Amino acid sequence: MAKSDLKTYKKRLLEMRDEIRHLSESTEEDRKPVELDQSMVGRLSRMDALQGQAMQLETERRRGVELQRIDAALGRIENEDFGYCLTCGEDIEVKRLEHDPTAPTCMVCARG
């Protein structure tokens, strides 16, 4: 893979990482524990708040997984392994990398 292509992928991965971190920071308040003070909030409102908190926690977990994928892809760029399937060692299709630069495997190996 050309160095210019690697720079483009690295830039895109860094932008993706920054965006995820920004989203994580902006929703931090929504993940905090819900107070169960009945004098201030009714039962249904508490249930809504708990459900909202649970959804935010799951979203944050998924962001963590995506950050791991991004960091792994950045590591592959640094090790000059980016663009090669981790399973079979063949080139990962350019269209696949354009769609998802964190993809660690080619389509054949991804299908299983």
Image (cartoon, rainbow, N blue to C red):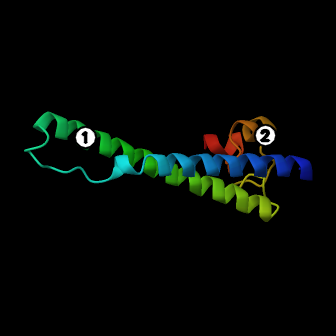
Q: Quadrant of residue 42?
A: top left
Residue 45 pos. (x, y %): 18, 35
- Secondary structure, mark 2, is loop
Left or right: 48, with 83 as reference point: left
Left or right: 13, with 54 as reference point: right
Q: Residue furthest left?
A: 39
Task: Give above or below for 39 relative to 77.
Answer: above
Q: Nearer the viewer, residue 50 or 2?
A: 50
Residue 105 in view (yes/no): no
Residue 62 pos. (x, y %): 48, 48
Q: Residues within 10 Å of mark 1 (few under 14, many from 20)?
A: some
Mark 2 — residue?
A: 93
Left or right: 84, with 73 as reference point: right
Q: Nearer the viewer, residue 69 or 88?
A: 69
Residue 88 in view (yes/no): yes
Q: Which amino acid lies under the numbered mark 2 shown in the image of this protein?
A: Glu
Residue 96 pos. (x, y %): 73, 38
Query: Can you say which quadrant of the picture contains the C terminus?
Result: top right
Q: Residue furthest front?
A: 40
Q: Mark 1 or mark 2, which is nearer the start of the sequence?
A: 1
Q: Nearer the viewer, residue 86 or 19?
A: 19
- Secondary structure, mark 1, is helix
Q: Residues within 10 Å of mark 2 (few under 14, many from 20)?
A: some
Separation (CA) of disc 2 from disc 1 = 44 Å
Mark 1 — residue?
A: 49
Indicate which disc residue 102 carries: none
